Image (cartoon, rainbow, N blue to C red):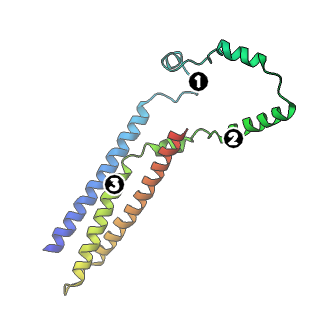
Amino acid sequence: MAYFLVMGGLALAVCFTFGWAVWRMLRWVFARLGRRAPSTGKKTASRASKGRKTSPRAPAKGAARAASKEKAPSPRANAAAEKGAARRDKAEPSPPWRLTVALASLRGAWPLAVLLGALYGGGRLVAHGMVARPQHAPDAFRQLVEAVGWGAAGLLGVAVLGWLATWRCRRQ
């Protein structure tokens, strides 16, 4: 009787987890299909008016006077300035890839990974408790616990990838 209660609870939790994952995936797909085609990267007039100004400010009068009074820099200083500018250009990160942006929106992977990890731990604990009984646990139970463990490890990997993608997109 205890076996059926444990297996029933485990099966119910696994079915709920997979059902929730399918539900979230379908919501994500329909949300993507419902959106307009992606823009070509050009800002529209409404976006430009809402954001900050696109034209740089004119330099202050005092800065213009100070720059005109300074003497011209030497060729060695020009070469050093060009090297510094080249280093700054290389330091800027490139824009994130589409896959990175898509992975950054995986916020549901962490809770699923924690849930499956807890299910795996509970299943291992039950399997350990069943060893002391005179009857052995069926092989299907061990296979189910192993599959839940691999699922938890896979979801943890996806969650870490999503976290890194989110960090990469914020760094941009």
| Whole-number angstrom distance, CA of label 2 to CA of label 1 | 24 Å
Q: Crowding near pointer 3: few (<14 within 10 Å), some, many (20+)?
A: many
| Whole-number angstrom distance, CA of label 1 to CA of label 3 | 38 Å
Q: Place residue 43 in its image quadrant.
A: top right
Residue in the foreground of this view, choosing between 20 and 161: 161
Residue 42, disc: 1
Residue 23 rendering spot, x and y as whole percentages:
32, 45
Q: Residue at x 37, y 61 (%)?
A: 152
Q: Place residue 14 in its image quadrant.
A: bottom left
Specify which label sits upstream in the sequence, 3 or 2. Answer: 2
Residue in the foreground of this view, choosing between 162 and 131: 162
Question: Callout 1, which amino acid?
Answer: Lys
Residue identified by numbered label 3: 112
Residue 51, disc: none
Q: Residue at x 19, y 65 (%)?
A: 8
Question: Callout 3, which amino acid?
Answer: Leu
Q: Residue at x 42, y 60 (%)?
A: 154
Q: Place residue 114 in its image quadrant.
A: bottom left
Residue that protrudes farthest toward the top in the picture: 61
Are the two marked residues, 3 and 2, in contact with CB atoms closer than 8 angstroms? no
Q: Where, quadrant-wise, is the C terminus in this rendering?
A: top right
Q: Secondary structure at mark 1?
A: loop
Question: Callout 2, which amino acid?
Answer: Lys
Q: Where, quadrant-wise, is the N terminus in this rendering?
A: bottom left
Q: Residue at x 24, y 63 (%)?
A: 11
| Whole-number angstrom distance, CA of label 3 to CA of label 2 | 39 Å
